[in-house]
Amino acid sequence: MIRTAVTQLSVSHLLQEAFRSLDSDTGPALQDRGIFDLTPSQARALLLLDRSGTRLTELARRAGVTKQAMMQMVDDLQAMGCLRRTPDPGDARAKIVKLTAKGLRHRAQARKAVQTVESKVRRRLGPRRYAALRAALEELTAEE
């Protein structure tokens, strides 16, 4: 990206570009682990699920997306054999999204891929700057 001396990018733009950079590293990290059928977004979605299952509305909240967007993600992951929906024992109208055996394997590899990408960032920034970045991002995303 070419920048002029007059143009200073906004923090939101820089965060978006940093995310894109990390996201583009996640795909190859998944492939290095033999996972060729997951996108980085799908991998992140698998990491949001509790082992005992999670309601769709809670998944959408955790991901910061609409219920409809998460429903599409869950539909796609279910079609791939990574997830299944089961009735919610506490609410007959609701469903619990659970990982299948394939989903558990993919989630484990997704976690390792994300850790690999984060390790790369930690090495690039150094431990103090990495810790400062994490602290700043946690502060920015903390609920008020």
Image: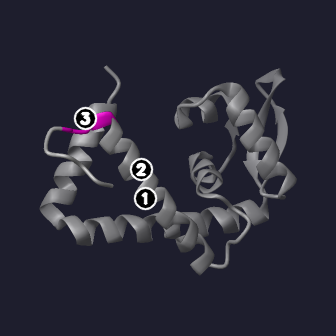
Marks 1/2 in contact by CB < 8 Å: the verdict is: yes
**Main secondary structure of the magenta stretch:** loop
Q: Residues within 10 Å of mark 3 (few under 14, many from 20)?
A: few
Tell which tag, 1 or 3, sits nearer the viewer: 1
Q: CA distance from mark 2 to mark 3?
A: 17 Å
Q: Residues within 10 Å of mark 1 (few under 14, many from 20)?
A: some
Q: Badge 1 is on which residue?
A: 22
Q: Badge 2 is on which residue?
A: 19
Residue 16 locus on image (x, y percent)? 40, 43
Q: Residue at x 86, y 52 (%)?
A: 79
Compared across the picture, whether 99 is left or right of 27 comes to right
Quick one: label 2 or label 3, which is nearer the N terminus?
A: 2
Q: Badge 3 is on which residue?
A: 139
Instruction: Name the kind of residue labelled 2 in the image.
Output: Phe
Q: Quadrant of residue 90?
A: top right
Q: Quadrant of residue 86?
A: top right
Q: Residue at x 67, y 72 (%)?
A: 35
Quick one: label 1 or label 3, which is nearer the N terminus?
A: 1
Q: Residues within 10 Å of mark 2 (few under 14, many from 20)?
A: few
Q: Quadrant of residue 118?
A: bottom left
Quadrant where the N terminus sits is: bottom left
Residue 95 locus on image (x, y percent)? 80, 32
Q: Which residues are magenta?
A: 7-12
